[in-house]
Image (tube, rainbow, N blue to C red):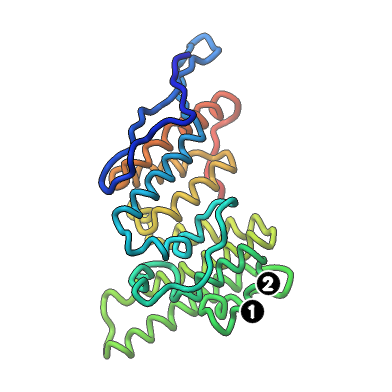
Amino acid sequence: MVGCACGGADLGEPRAGGNPQTTLPHYRFNEQTERRAEVAANDPSMLLALSEWHLDAAKVAYPQIASALPLLMSSWRLPVDPDAEGALEKDAFAWLFARSVLCSEDMLFLQAVDAAGAGAVTEWADKSPLAAALAPAYNGEKVDREVVLDQSVRLMRQAQAAMVVLSGGEAGHHRPFALFVRLGVLRAGMRMADKAGQYRDAGILRLEALERMEGGKGSVQRDPAFALSVAAWDVNNRSPLRPEDILHNLIPDFPALGAARTPLEALHLRLNRNAAPSTPVH
């Protein structure tokens, strides 16, 4: 085995457009087989450090949005991160553009779901459009995924009709923006199902949302963070095939994601050595 120690490594000063000072992979092992094939590996703590470096670099690039980042990133916060508080200031509303939320109250609703569970939908139904759409899907104990699917289409059509009225006619960009509304309902319903302990229902909604991102190669490029969350979910299910496709599509635009390729390839190799070929979870 050859490798390098990673604890306390200096990645360099975060800067916009730059890259951290690190060399990947950190370790190389030889399999204990006749082939003695080489397997690369990364220190998992370094992957966390790299993500923090890129977050700090984003703050350097856009210092005016630093105060809004906790709320904007509430979907992806770590368990040790504090809850975001307050609402987006008006000068930060532009950061809602092309997101799967309709207003800052939707973000606060989703944060309430993470903190208090699916029951938060009742409290927020008169303040958050997503909560209002999802309230019929929750009976106080469980989330009905079929109602979530129906409500996602219903709210999408309402948004599309409203855009036609406001613009005085139908335009080509109406459907793509209405699709963001549908994705918002699907993803919010997914988070409610997760908090309600409905792993399978949440998974179905998760994959439905990924598929609704127009399909094909460009599907994962609409929202890279969500696509990567699906990849992580797949890996947790010991299914590396779809994550490999997601990374393949994203890395040309986001080279830093190459750091995740090494552990994913190692997982795939390990599964191939110990089990029949796996397939994506459906």
Give the secondary structure at mark 1. helix
Q: Nearer the viewer, residue 11 or 102?
A: 11
- Amino acid type at circle 1 is Glu
The single residue placed furthest to the right in the displayed view is 141
Which residue is at the far top? 34
65 vs 191, left or right, is: left
Q: Is residue 219 left or right of residue 253?
A: right
Q: Where is residue 26 shown, x and y percent of the image?
A: 43, 25
- Residue at the disc numbered 1: 123
Q: On the image, which quarter does residue 28 sit in?
A: top left
* Nearer to me, 139 or 50: 50
Mark 2 lies on residue: 119
Q: Residue at x 34, y 84 (%)?
A: 163
Category of crowding for the residue at label 2, using alpha-carbon neighbours closer than 10 angstroms: few (below 14), some (14–19), many (at least 20): many
Amino acid carrying label 2: it is Gly
- Res 180 seen here: yes
Q: Position of residue 206 (x, y in %)?
A: 53, 58
C-alpha separation, residue under disc 1 versus residue under disc 2: 8 Å
Q: Report if the CB atoms under discs 1 and 2 are less than 8 Å apart.
A: yes
